[in-house]
Image (cartoon, helix red, strand yellow):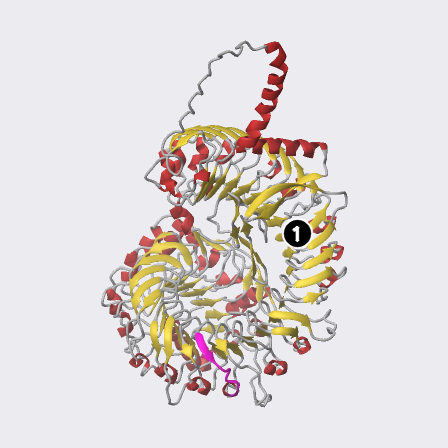
Amino acid sequence: MKIQPAVLLFLVISLIHCTCLSHVISGLCLDDQRSLLLQFKNNLTFDTFISTKLISWNESTTPCCEWGGVTCDHHAHVIALNLNSDGIYGELDNSSSLFSLQHLQFLNLEGNTFHSSIPSKFNNLENLSYLNLAETGFVGEVPTENFQLTRLVTLDLSGSNNLKLDNSNLGKLVQNLTNIRNMYLDYVSISGEGNEWYNALLLLPHLQELSMQGCGLMGTFPPEIFQITTLSLIDISYNPELHGSFPDIPLNGSFHTISVAQTNFSGGLPLSIGNVVYLSSLDLSHCNFSGTIPTTLFQLRELNHVDLSYNKFIGAIPSFSKAKKLAHLDLSANGLNGSISSSAQFEGKQSLFYIDLSYNSVSGSIPSSLFLIPSLNIVVLSNNQFSTLEESTGVFSSKLETLDISYNNLSGSIPSFIFQLSGLSRLILGNNKLSWPLPIGALAQLENLRDLDLSFNKIDDVNVTHVVHSTFPQLFSLNLAHCNLKIFPGFLRYQSELYHLNLSYNQIQGALPSWIWRLGNLFYLDVSHNLLTNFEGPLPNLTHHERGFLRLQFNQLQGPIPVFSISASVADLSNNNFSGLIPTDIGYHMRITNYFSLANNNLDGPIPHSLCDASMLQVLDLSHNKISGEIPLCLMKLGENLGVLNLGSNKLTGHIPDTFPNSCALQTIVLDGNQLAGSLPKSLKHCTALEVLDVGRNQIVGSFPCFLSHISALRVLFLRNNKFHGPIGCAKDNSVWNMIQIVDVAFNNFGGELPVKWFRGWKMMMSNSGEAQSKVGNLGFQARPSDIYYPDSVTILTGKISTIIIIKGHEIELVKILTTFTSIDFSYNQFEGKLPKELMDFKALHLLNLSHNALSGQIPSSIGNMSQLESLDLSMNSLEGQIPTELANLNFLSVLNLSFNHLTGRIPTGTQLQSFEASSFEGNDGLYGPPLTKTPNPLPPSPEVPPCGSLACEVHWDLVSAEVGLVFGLGSIIVPLLFWKRWRMRYCQFLDKTLCRIFPQLCHEYERRGGQTYRVLVWRSVGFG
């Protein structure tokens, strides 16, 4: 609740008035007033342990005018009730005797809980000038027709999230309150369109304070309201759909507070802001303001609080030396540059408490005079381009608690005065170019230090033998990531209060010390990306240790997996050399674990069934091991909470369990690179949030999975290298998968024509580059509440949530999948027909591979629409006609293969097509021009027939007919196989498929030789692991 000066004056006068007349009314209490108050109390429900006012209302004790929260006039009429936060709950309806207190002028019910609508009888209290119903739990529509309280000066309905006001009704409410001066409607839901209430506000002659935070306002806020000369406070923050801008502000304005934070206000800040001479607080944070910050702003001498963060302001920071009362300055997350003009900026700032200039491009020196301000408490200058921190002497602020100058270009050693900031509790210096031995002795002077971040700097020596450990501050958080460490800092073993420890990205070798487990408060441990090889000594019993984050990934740890109490929310042991079986009971210790990864180790054996008891798991990654056996049926039931399941690149056999729950929450499923057979389970259709499905490189059979067509969230589909067959597409679905961006069905037995109807629905591949760039991001999963991000990735053949796309024998690995990356691979199937024109509408497509099919017809000239195409492979088809000149307009094209078709004519010249090798065009007999021959291949001359001479010219055809037939019959088969690569490859494909049908043990695998990828037949015996 906001109490303005007028209300305070009213309360004071009322109390003085009552005190002066106490000799008149102390013994008086009008019977009707007492009776009405007691009825009001008896009809209320309140908590006697909380109440300090209602509980004192007792007929047998003091007169009613002396009861808690009650004020009377000199006639003993109740004129004020102040029952704020008195533990009242239940309903307040029209039958309440409250509405019979006709002399009531002041009513405060703030902070109680009424689970009912606002009674219409409030209109009976016609003398009411102050009404506070803030945070009272009233619900439903505000009865505007019953608020014709013409004497009302202050109305506060703020904080009642379940109250609603239609836009037009708000206009009526405002019109009825003709004497209103202060109106607070924060978080009342205001819906509908129209400017009735805006216009009504302009007609209120006495309006002084208007607060409408979080009301859901939409449309354009009328700039004229900022020109109302009586207004002193306006707060319309937290209305993200509200647009507007600042007009020129008149010289005689009365504003002391302006807040439009978290709205869609834009434009520049006018120079006339300097006319608001009484302005004390200005909050424009999280908007779209742009331009330079006017110099007139910081010439306002009453200015106390300025927040312009998260906008688009540019230019230099103006001088704020004249704003002597400035206490809070936040200019973070803009485009400000230049340097801090001079040390005089901070002289005379006796009130400055908080300064944040982070996430800009401010350069130059950080003035040491900043640290001489006696009131300074928080300094955040991170993510800039400061290069120097000035050394200085003097009396430095003892109140400074937080100093964050991380992510700058600071070099050299830390200035010594930093260690004289005796009140410092947070020192954040990470991500600079500082290089020095860790000043353990100097840090010991900062006895209040709790959080220390020196990460991504170069520290030479962090062992400690000369420091008295009892005098060294007990840290709460320590970050020494990427500090060139080679051993564990010795002083750490004495940090008994340490909660957060990050030593990642160093060169620490050897064993993980046993004393680290004895740090009883340690919740977050990150020693990833080091050279650790083992655990020191026998591990203590860790099954009851709580570790919120245990990050050991990217080391060289070996041996069996230790059974931690994965009371840890996050346990990442991936990318090590662990071997052996996964402990059978590991899941029993993972009751609160939501992120668990053993990926990229040498583990074997089955998946433990105990993992099914880890019901809180959101990410489970066991990929890139040698795990064998079948997938436990119960594992899929974790899908109610599980977001990522990655079992790829193992030796799993059997079928994929058909046990996905009805409330499946999985977003990523990776099962590629195993020996799974059978068909895709139909229960996958329950996973409606699925974004990534990768079952490539298995032995899965069946037709195209039409039962997934309703999953609109799907972005990545990999069915590569299985035994799927039949046409692609579903008869009943014409427009599905609007978000799909990567489709790989290569190396299957799909056939028929390309799915034209489905292409029409793949909107992500049609987006223009401007739209795509505005939405750029990475695919992945955010585990809650640990906030660990699991990135989806593609190996354009297989990897961590990875899949391989082969482009002309090359593998492309995408460690992260950009939301703008798009790819289609239909190669090595039996597709036929023409290239559909709908495919040419994919102007956002990056990779297209249709090679090794039976496509015919011409390459459409509209292929020039595919402006983002980087790789195109149409080889080994039956395409004919000329290469369209529009193909040469694809400026990003870096891989092209049109070989072994029936293309004819001249290759378009004077374009980048000549930059490709001749192999990109070979096998097209009618094609010529650079990089092939300059002219069409001439026909060889006919040989001359020698005369018969004395030899008989008669041929005995009856003798040679059999031989000729045999020779020509064999030649018609052998010669094409010897000299025509396309015939040879198709013959091999036909032979492979025939053998696979005859011998089920035969399957295709891929291997790398000489930088090329080859498909080979492999005989797999039953039970092969």
Can see residue 344? yes
Residue 58's place in the image compared with 856, above or below, is: below
Task: Name the residue located 45 percent from the left edge and 33 percent from the top edge.
Answer: 838
The answer to which of 812 and 266 lies nearer the viewer is 812
Q: Magenta segment: does it hold 627? A: no
Residue ranking furthest to the front: 950
Numbered range of the magenta stretch: 433-441
Residue 138 screen position, x and y as percent: 52, 58
Residue 322: x and y in percent read 27, 78
Is any atom of residue 233 visible in this view? no
Residue 671 screen position, x and y as percent? 64, 48
Q: Quadrant of residue 991?
A: top right
Left or right of 451? Residue 936 is: left
Which is nearer the eye, 55 or 199?
Answer: 199
Q: Nearer the viewer, residue 115 or 617?
A: 617
Task: Find disc 1 in the rendering and name its residue.
Answer: 647
In the rendering, at what x and y percent does residue 81 appear? 48, 69
